[in-house]
Image (cartoon, grey):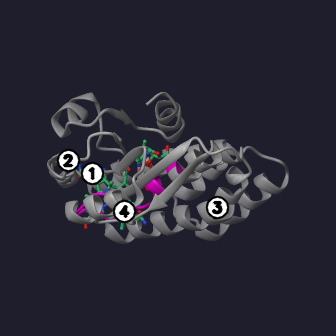
Amino acid sequence: MQEELFTKIVDMDEEGSIKLAKEYLESGGNPQKLLEVCRNAMGVIGDKFEKGEYFLSELILGGEIFGSIMEFTLPHIKEGESEKLGKIVLGTVKDDIHNIGKDIFKAFVEAAGFEVIDIGVDVPEEEFVKQVKEHKPDIIGMSCLITAGISSMKRTVEAIKAAGITDAKIIIGGGRVDEEVRQLAGADAWADDAAKGVRLCKEL
Ligand code: B12
């Protein structure tokens, strides 16, 4: 399945990839593996976009294919533990509208037993602060896929600290995030995949 699905997504075969993904799940396939294949295919679509081989229309269609597959795959991941491990306020930072990675991390961390308050995408720093004050989470999660989002993350962390919120741990994630960005943003932890993010949330 994996190679065939990967190729169908990269080739923009929407109908074929959705059909194959459904068949895989119906035959008892692993939902996490399925999402991993999709994510790898999105990486190739992104690379092709960068090289000028694909255009914005392909980026959009790729996102739609992944979105459709995610819709019927995430409920399979949600069948998880019920004991609550803590609360997370999660959003994609200002100037970034990518939601797929955030939504996958949300499903993973909910399945692991965390309560998640999802505050959406393109979230300004003042909205993060407002939501954190209201919900008093144990952890604040920020997603970021574009370079422009790095300064948004830094500003958001600064705004959270300036508001006197020091007890919630901050974890950042997404394709643009690494140890250097974590240090720059002043976050406590970073993860570039959902499973690693869940492990870190349990440790924080
Ligand atoms: C699909 C897509 C889009 C779709 C988004 C659809 C959607 N609903 O999200 C659309 C078409 C809207 C889009 C728009 C744009 N995009 Co775009 N997009 C992509 C693409 C191909 C896939 C993104 C994706 O969904 N990946 C799959 C997910 C599952 O991976 P992930 O996000 O990394 O998430 C995983 C982990 O990181 C982690 N995680 C994610 N968040 C969090 C949070 C926490 C707290 C934790 C712990 C973990 C965690 O868990 C996830 C599962 O393991 C990427 C290519 C790529 N390599 O990522 C480009 C990419 C991100 N886009 C890019 C660009 C340039 C753009 C545009 C500027 C294009 C344009 N000219 O308009 C706009 C930006 C709009 C904006 N202001 O945000 C660039 C960014 C380059 C850069 N350095 O800034 C990329 C890298 C493509 C490229 N190679 O050039 N895009």
Q: Name the residue under label 3.
A: 17
Q: Name the residue under label 1.
A: 51
Quadrant holding the C terminus: top left
Disc 3 is placed on an element classified as helix
* Amino acid type, callout 3: Ser
Residue 124 in which image quadrant: bottom left
Q: Residues within 10 Å of mark 2 (few under 14, many from 20)?
A: few
Disc 4 is placed on an element classified as helix
Percent coordinates x, y for residue 134 in the rendering = 36, 62
Q: Mark 2 points at which residue?
A: 164
Residues rendered magenta in the picture: 92-105
Asked if the magenta segment contains residue 104, the reply would be yes
* Amino acid type, callout 2: Gly
Tell me: 18 left or right of 193: right
Q: Residue 134 carries which label?
A: 4
Percent coordinates x, y for residue 13 in the rendering = 58, 65
* Amino acid type, callout 1: Lys
| 98 or 93: nearer the viewer | 93
Report the label total. 4
**Residues under labels 2 and 1: Cα distance?**
44 Å
The earlier-in-sequence mark between 3 and 2 is 3
Looking at the picture, does residue 120 appear above or below residue 35?
A: below
On whether ligand 1 comes within 8 Å of the CB at mark 2, the answer is no
**Residues under labels 3 and 4: Cα distance?**
41 Å
The earlier-in-sequence mark between 1 and 3 is 3
User: Which of the two marks, 3 or 4, is nearer to us in this view?
Assistant: 4
Q: Residues within 10 Å of mark 3 (few under 14, many from 20)?
A: many
Residue 40 appears in the figure: yes
Image quadrant, ligand 1: bottom left
* Amino acid type, callout 4: Glu
**Residues under labels 1 and 3: Cα distance?**
24 Å
**Residues under labels 2 and 4: Cα distance?**
14 Å
